[in-house]
Amino acid sequence: MTALRGGRDEIGAQAAFDRDDARIPNARRYEALGRVMAVLAGEAEMLEACRDLAWWRGSDHSWHIEWRDGPNASEVAALLVERVQEPGFAGSLAGPAGLVTASMATLDVMGVSFVLRAVDPIGMTRLRARPGLWRMSATLDGAVTAGRRATPRQQWEELLGG
């Protein structure tokens, strides 16, 4: 009976070890995804310009991020290389891992591969040139301050950038 129980303990111990081994790389993958998405979430103008933003894990455990319209993949890659950082760490946690073009870029973030794909990108220069919600509110704010509004700005106007 003791031998049988010992065999079960060894099998259970091995299974727990395998689960921990699988969890550690997955934790790093999800942390890298979280850092990338946090940077993208901080860029409201960039996210507003993207249509159909989607991300998924590839078969090789890399992350794929794809969007329509919006910025070039090279512009998003440059933003991520610049802003994905660890407090107290001097360098960036992201860097190019392959070819970087207007429609496709491959990055390495914390040892995790990211494939960025822009479908029909417009580019940030063209996006900034066309009127949008944020620029429209700034234009209206200039017209309102010309003398038509006597009340101070509301909190919701501050949040919307108007």
Image (spheres, rainbow, N blue to C red):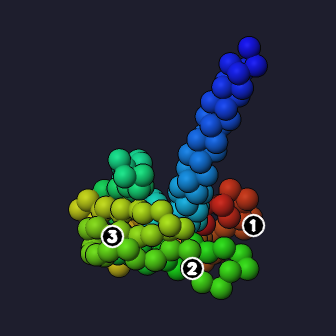
In the rendered structure, are the residues bearing label 2 and label 1 in contact, judged by CB atoms less than 8 Å apart?
Answer: no
Packing grade of label 3 (10 A; few <14, some 14-19, many >=20) is many
Q: Quick check: can you spot residue 45? A: no
Residue beneath disc 2: 92
Q: Which residue is label 1 attached to?
A: 152
Residue 104 at x, y percent in the picture: 28, 67
Q: Position of residue 144 (x, y in %)?
A: 59, 70
Mark earlier in primary sequence (1, 3): 3
Q: Position of residue 52 (x, y in %)?
A: 36, 49
Callout in the foreground (1, 3) = 3
* Tag of residue 78: none
- Percent across and percent down for residue 17 are 64, 42
**Sequence-first disc among 2 and 1:** 2
Specify few, some or many for label 2: CA neighbours under 10 Å numbering under 14, 14-19, or 20 or more: some
Rendered-image quadrant of the N terminus: top right
Report if the CB atoms under discs 2 and 3 are less than 8 Å apart.
Answer: no
Q: Amino acid at mark 3?
A: Ala
Disc ID at residue 105:
3
Q: Residue at x 35, y 69 (%)?
A: 106
Q: Between marks 2 and 1, how big is the CA–CA gap? A: 42 Å
